[in-house]
Amino acid sequence: MRILIVTDLWHPTVNGTVRMIGQVKRQLEQSGHQITVIGPERFKTRPFSGDPEVPVAIRPEETIGPMMREAQPEAIHIATAGPIGVAARNILAARKIPFTTAFLTRSPEYMQARFGIPLEKTYATLRAFHAASRCVMVPSAGIIAELKALNFGKNLKLWPVGTNTERFRPRDKGFLDLPRPIHLNVGRVTIEKNLEAFLGLDLPGSKLVVGDGPERARLQKQFSDVHFVGMKQGEELAKYYAAADVFVFPSRTDTLGLVMMEALASGLPVAAYPVTGPNEVIGDSGTGVLDEDLGKAIAAARKIDPAKCRAYAMQFSWARSARDFLAMLALIRGAAIKEPGPGDMPDLLN
């Protein structure tokens, strides 16, 4: 299949959405599919005011039409509801061309935390955005239940994520020379990640944060005892995971938390709050501890057998995630973007 993926988040930005799209793209290409990604690098951009390292496309609606037509897709997936995703959605909806979308991040909660925008306003915008989608892909059953309660309709489908169990695996812990136990967090250092709930705890050993973001300078100054090492990727990131002793996930807003799965694959037990995301990944697996008292959860998680975490993570694969993605695209296959005809609206694509 010729598949077009439209996204406001793409390389070089590093986050769970980019990693998920990238992994599925790689799996599909290995199976012979042709994948075209339209991301922010193809437009003029400006820094996102809430996170300057994230580029935001400027007026993508002016040029995205020809890009989409050039790809000649048999199936179209819109991964995000930013300016690029909205521009693509509006063109496709106006021409009644079917497409799928995804709900991968709790952007209403993020917008409220960063800018004070009421949740109701952002969720209303998202309901309108996804209403024209033939299938809204959601990474967890818990989020599906929440979206149904918010009147998002009946076209919500589970799209489970995977993890790279070859890269993220138990390794020599000598990579880190810090007092043990080492309590690790990996991810963007932003306000909605609730890192202060972790960094402010009185814990034995060390606290380590791998990642970067707009809150890093403030938190690094406030918590001088915490080791901040910045963003790491690939093999180096895998070594940090494997060398730690417990993974701490203080976020209350993530839809799933891909980093938790990477930690488990590396043999790290997880400590988190009992909220959607950790509930979906950890559940009653015995590979982590969920408690409203995060310090209590961390202490209990340190007692979990790392081998149990690794064994549990082996059931998650990107190959399965890619197969599920294809199955949902099959609902709309064959509706390629063609040259405008007499009954079409050519101004939308020019």
Image: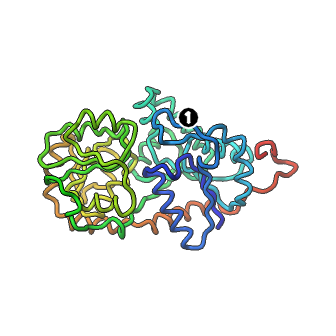
Q: Position of residue 217 (x, y in %)?
A: 33, 36
Q: Is residue 56 above or below residue 240?
A: above
Residue drawn at (24%, 37%) of the image: 197
Color scheme of the displayed model: rainbow
Residue at (42% x, 59% y) in the render: 161
Near-viewer residue (192 or 220): 220
**Residue 258 seen in the current view:** yes
The one nearer the camera, 27 or 292, is 27
Q: Is residue 33 above or below residue 98?
A: below
Residue 49 horizontal/vertical position (percent)? 49, 32
Residue 73 pos. (x, y %): 69, 60
134 up-or-down from 221: above or below = below
Q: How many marks?
A: 1
Neighbor class of circle 1 (other Cα within 10 Å; few <14, some 14-19, many 20+) is few
Q: The N terminus is located in which quarter?
A: bottom right
Quadrant location of residue 198? top left
**Residue type pointed to by label 1:** Thr
Residue shown at the point (73%, 57%) measured from the top left: 70
Q: Is residue 3 left or right of residue 13?
A: right
Q: Please identify the quarter of the rendering in which residue 335 is found.
A: bottom right
| Extreme residue toward the bottom, this view | 31
**Closer to us: 231 or 106:** 231
Q: Residue at x 28, y 37 (%)?
A: 220
- Quarter of the image with the C terminus is top right
Q: Which residue is mark 1?
A: 125
- For numbered disc 1, what is the local secondary structure? helix
Question: Which residue occupies the foreground of this view, 149 or 16?
Answer: 16
Lateral position of residue 72 relative to residue 245, left or right? right
Answer whether residue 335 is visible to the viewer in this image: no
